[in-house]
Amino acid sequence: MPALGADMGAGTLVEWLIKPGDLVKRGDIVAVVETQKGAIEIETFNEGMVSELVVPVGTKVPVGSLIARIGEPSEATPAKAAPAKAVPLAPPVSPPSLPAAAPMTPAGPALHAVKITPAARRRAAELSIDPARLSGTGVEGAVTVADVEAAVAHRAAAQAPPASTPARRIGFDPAEMRKAIAAAMGRSKREIPHYYLSHTIDFGAVLTWLAAFNDAQPVPNRLLPAVLLLKASALALREVPQLNGTYVDGGFQPGAGIHVGWAISLRGGGLVAPAVRDADTHSLTELMAVMRDLVQRARAGGLRSSELGSATITITSLGDRGAETVLGIIYPPQVALIGFGGVAVRPWVVDGRVEPRPLVTVSLAGDHRASDGHIGGLLLNAIERLLQVPEKL
Amino acid sequence: MSDVDTRSMIVELLSAIAPEADFTSLAGAEDLREALDLDSMDFMNFIVALHERAGIDIPEADYPKLRTLDGIAAYLAR
């Protein structure tokens, strides 16, 4: 059972998408786990043949528990399961008293294209099956009609005893979500000595560039200002890597890549911050597509394990209906959180004259065990500089 | 398209974005983003859906006209 963030102590296995004898590869979705953040799709980091499903559907197990065995492809028979690798790599452990002590899971690709035959896609739509959850048996691993039908049968079988097995719940339970936030934020405030910085940025260049860019784009390709905030922050973190990473075992560990947890508020209460992986390397158009997808799946309960628990920093952006400033709480074990308030037109001095300008307030919450305010100031100044030349983002 | 058809289409598109919202009490002049707690990403997804369903181009400068049921109906009836 992988740890899907610092606030997770256990998860309930609600659906297996593999069975003994199946061949799986890194990044395949193998199971669905119910957590305080809703139903999460679990990806595997192993390759080989599934030899055993250890945990039955409907069982709640602590983070770190063995849930399945996956062997090497050459180990042809399930009987040879003894040398098989456990999934996940971590050995079984008892639930940590603080739910945060679990190690981060290694992360797979955030997005992968689904190969599927046209007939299978139609059948999947009719049956409300997400083809991304299926492992295909067709040419080049394509999902076939038979795979879709098998998944339906599998799901029906998994839910056979209706009295004892809860039906797959889509979305999340606000009360459980509140507990998860309480655990993570309580730990953060107990353990992390926060320092706070705030900086006001002229947002006029971004809005002018964005209006011209969007004017030339068809409706589905237009960008939101939030995408430029994300990209500018990710590029600034390249310059100030001391704020991108985690604080583990008494020391700072730099992040391997800039994986930005994007805070998404959920109607009905609660929030979740799935990772936009390698955010500094994508174009604005790519980031927009990733963010739209993440927001929709966050609200529908279809986030993947690689998207949770792998972020190296978090950004919260209040949007145009939000307050002017946000001073955030760091999500452990990360060491910083960047917060953007809503854009507001305010008096601003340009070339010695007072002018009405659109302004945005960016804040930084930093972990004083890992960095000082001077470093934080460098980051905010870099974000300001990058947002003055939006065409280069 | 009649006014009633237009409204039911808008509600259908919004239901896909905010499935938990209650549309029965939604007044024609109410700001959709306030009434349904839509953020800028939700509103953008709604505009994309409207563009695809109604088959019309919607310049970004027109977005403020599309913040209420009445406004959208008037915009589509132009």
Image (cartoon, grey):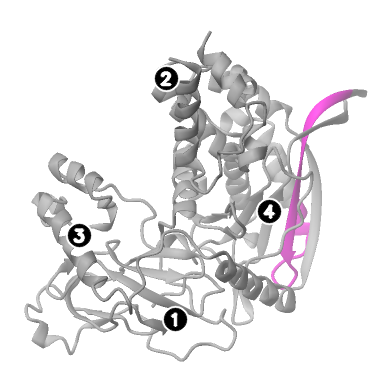
In primary-sequence order, the first of circles 4 and 1 is: 1
In primary-sequence order, the first of circles 3 and 4 is: 3
In this rendering, do the residues under marks 2 and 4 share a single chain? no
**Marks 3/1: CA–CA distance:** 28 Å
Circle 1 SS class: loop
In this rendering, do the residues under marks 3 and 1 share a single chain? yes
Circle 2 SS class: helix
Chain letter, disc 3 residue: A
Chain letter, disc 4 residue: A
Q: Nearer the viewer, residue B23 or A387?
A: B23
The number of numbered discs placed on residues in the rendered structure image is 4
In primary-sequence order, the first of circles 3 and 1 is: 1
Residue under pointer 3: A152
Tell me what residue is drawn at x 20 percent, y 47 percent: A115
In this rendering, do the residues under marks 3 and 2 share a single chain? no
In this rendering, do the residues under marks 3 and 4 share a single chain? yes
In this rendering, do the residues under marks 1 and 2 share a single chain? no
**Marks 1/2: CA–CA distance:** 48 Å
- In the displayed orientation, state which residue is furthest to the top: B78
Question: Which amino acid type is marked by label 2?
Answer: Ala
Residue under pointer 4: A338
Image quadrant assignment for residue A165:
bottom left
Left or right: residue A10 versus residue A230 is left
Residue under pointer 2: B54
* Range drawn in magenta: A355-377
Tell me what residue is drawn at x 26 percent, y 76 percent: A161
Chain letter, disc 2 residue: B
Question: Which amino acid type is marked by label 4?
Answer: Ile
Magenta stretch: residue A154 in it?
no
Question: Which amino acid type is marked by label 3?
Answer: Val
- In the displayed orientation, state which residue is furthest to the left: A76
